[in-house]
Image: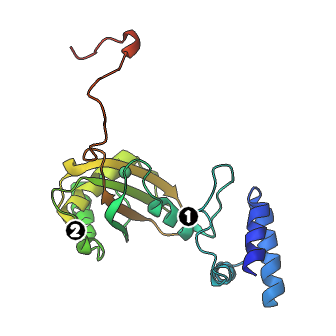
Amino acid sequence: MRKKILQIIDENRDNIEALRDHLFAAFNKTENKNYDSKNASPEEEEEITRWIVSNEIHFIGFDNTEDVRRVFVNETSKVSFLTQSHCNICQDKLPISNFPVRITPKTRQTKTKLKNEFIKQFLNSPFGKELNFSKKDKLCVKLVFVFNRIRDKDLDNMAKLTLDALKELIQIDDKNIDHLELIKFKARYLESFIYIRISKSDVNTANNVILKGKHMTWAGLTKLDE
Ligand SMILES: [Zn+2]
């Protein structure tokens, strides 16, 4: 069955409706059900998700080659992909931490009282307390803001407030973040929350530049701040 499901995904990844129809048909046939792909309840869709996962299919969006369209079993697996995929810039070194904070994203423009409340709640995040980064570590931080039916917000404003809270949670300095990646994901099914990935960044510590020369021509640009 695993092979069959993977084949359905592979052959229909460019047409998500057809992909759903084929998956429903395969599920109905195997499990002797009669679920309608155009009109399935969330519980029925959950059941099909469990069926897919029970066939040891977990990470389908992760192992893509560049020319095929990524598909995900559900929003949870899409958010996992967004948060857990490795950084292409930093050479990720352990420790790597991935954890959700179950809190609705707010921005630095939020009223002070709510902002303080946000930081207070953020500090109760159970995973954050177990992190093992020292004050000297240079960090690569990825923040994924998951939205569901809340007013749209600017990424930079959400990032600032979240980083202020994160700084208090894990006792690090903003200045030690050498690489920051921000993603906004508008969910239809998941609740609003923030997912955080932290690893060490070697952007400034790698010692991987070979020669001293600076071969930058600027193509006639004048320096603006002199
Ligand atoms: Zn990075």
- Asked if the residue at label 1 sits under 8 Å from ligand 1, the reply is no
> Which sits in the foreground, 201 or 74?
201
Disc 2 element: helix
Q: Name the residue under label 1.
A: 78
Q: Amino acid under label 1?
A: Lys
Q: Residue 120 carries which label?
A: 2
Looking at the picture, how far across and down is residue 216, in whole percent? 35, 20
Image position of 204 with respect to 199: above or below: above
Residue 88 locus on image (x, y percent): 44, 50
Of 93 and 226, nearer the camera is 93
* Left or right of 1 on screen, residue 123: left
Question: Which residue is outermost to the top?
Answer: 220
Quadrant assignment, res 40: bottom right
Amino acid carrying label 2: it is: Lys
Work out whether 46 lies above or below 155. below
Q: Residues within 10 Å of mark 2 (few under 14, many from 20)?
A: some
Mark 2 or mark 1, earlier in chain: 1
Q: Is residue 30 left or right of residue 195?
A: right
